[in-house]
Image (spheres, rainbow, N blue to C red):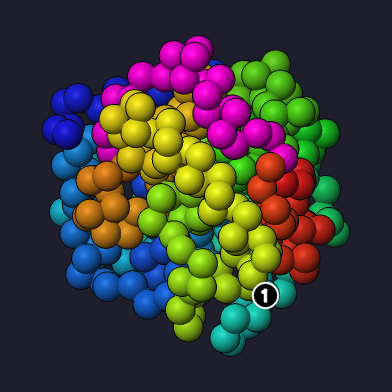
């Protein structure tokens, strides 16, 4: 796929125009899905840009800044207007795998942003968003602080991540929200009940992460595959007893994919993209091989009959296990 064939979608009424697929960079840093290959990660970013992908998503807490530094290296020398950076902030970390909650205080917002701008080597962030809701700080204060950074030119648009419909309304009343980033896939559809209708009412876009269920519905996963350093080993959907059931859903999906002459991964990504032009799927490819498989998903045309067959293969609520370990579920705006 060449860059001139990638269509664009707009993140809500007020957000930027971006490629119809975005690239999520989390897996390119250690601590997520095992040990990545740095050179291959950078080559994958380059391949995505050359294919017309303009939306790059990261978080300042991904391997404690490692991910931002990696992207800075991959983007060095590129025209700043040729890509859009989406950055999540606020998750507190400790040495090792420890997480310490979320900090959404206004002074923390400015501090996190200063570090991200420096690590990324840019003068502005295109979409800046708290990664999770800080229960101790009203969302109005957090968004108000980002608004100050918008006014100062350091941030172009404000986004949210993993919050409920009421929080979206409160945030949007302070400053227009471009998009909500939240998990959305064939096996994670809780957003459809209340969150997605609220976004559409307010003219807010959705960037969907986890569109392949962290690889579970990619067509490449097998039971017992997790390696040391791969966080999926503690995710309930990958645990023994759950993963075997969930992989039967993948086999049902594979039968539909064969009829469409595409891969399981392409079908799963295309399904998310087909849920509306206001949705941009993020693919977490960390190799050029996986990226090359994901990109043609935008060319898979799903008819009403196709969507019905996919629904029969993977009915709503059919996956077993929560999408995060129990310690993390309480901080999410919606469930599975």
Q: Which residue in the structure is indicated by mark 1? A: 99
The location of residue 316, given as percent across then percent down, is: 69, 34
Left/right placement of residue 101 relative to residue 138 reads left
Residue 292 seen: yes
Does 219 appear in magenta?
no
Secondary structure mostly seen in magenta is helix
Left/right placement of residue 280 relative to residue 161 reads left
Q: Which residues are magenta?
A: 295-317
For the point 22% across and 66% down, which residue is it? 40
Left/right placement of residue 222 relative to residue 287 reads right
* Quadrant of residue 285 within the rendered picture: bottom left
On screen, residue 209 above or below 137: above
* Quadrant of residue 26 within the rendered picture: bottom left
- Label 1 SS: strand
The location of residue 41, given as percent across then percent down, is: 27, 63
On screen, residue 142 above or below 310: below
For the point 70% across and 53% down, which residue is it? 320
**Front-most of residues 200 and 312:** 312
The location of residue 306, given as percent across then percent down, is: 46, 20
**Front-most of residues 101 and 119:** 101
**Front-most of residues 29 and 149:** 29
């Amino acid at each position: 796929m060449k860059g001139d064939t990638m269509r664009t979608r707009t993140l809500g009424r007020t957000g930027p125009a971006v490629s119809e697929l975005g690239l999520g960079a989390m897996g390119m840093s250690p601590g997520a899905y095992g040990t990545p290959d740095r050179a291959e990660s950078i080559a994958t970013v380059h391949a995505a840009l050359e294919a017309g992908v303009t939306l790059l998503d990261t978080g300042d807490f991904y391997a404690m800044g490692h991910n931002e530094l990696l992207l800075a290296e991959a983007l060095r020398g590129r025209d700043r207007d040729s890509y859009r950076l989406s950055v999540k902030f606020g998750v507190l970390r400790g040495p090792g795998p420890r997480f310490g909650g979320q900090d959404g205080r206004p002074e923390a917002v400015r501090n996190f942003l200063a570090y991200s701008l420096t690590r990324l080597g840019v003068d502005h962030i295109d979409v800046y968003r708290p990664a999770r809701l800080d229960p101790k700080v009203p969302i109005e204060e957090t968004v108000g602080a980002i608004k100050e950074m918008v006014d100062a030119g350091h941030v172009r648009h404000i986004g949210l991540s993993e919050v409920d419909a009421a929080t979206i309304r409160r945030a949007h009343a302070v400053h227009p929200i471009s998009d909500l980033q939240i998990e959305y896939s064939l096996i994670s559809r809780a957003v459809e009940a209340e969150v997605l209708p609220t976004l559409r009412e307010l003219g807010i876009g959705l960037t969907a992460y986890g569109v392949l269920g962290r690889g579970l519905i990619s067509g490449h996963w097998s039971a017992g595959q997790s390696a040391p350093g791969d966080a999926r080993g503690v995710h309930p959907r990958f645990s023994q007893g759950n993963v075997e059931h969930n992989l039967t859903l993948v086999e049902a999906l594979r039968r539909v994919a064969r009829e469409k002459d595409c891969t399981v991964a392409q079908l799963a990504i295309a399904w998310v993209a087909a849920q509306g032009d206001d949705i941009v799927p993020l693919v977490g490819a960390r190799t050029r091989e996986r990226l090359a498989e994901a990109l043609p998903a935008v060319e898979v045309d799903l008819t009403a009959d196709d969507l019905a067959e996919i629904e029969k293969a993977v009915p709503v609520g059919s996956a077993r296990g929560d999408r995060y370990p129990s310690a993390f579920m309480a901080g999410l705006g919606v469930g599975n």
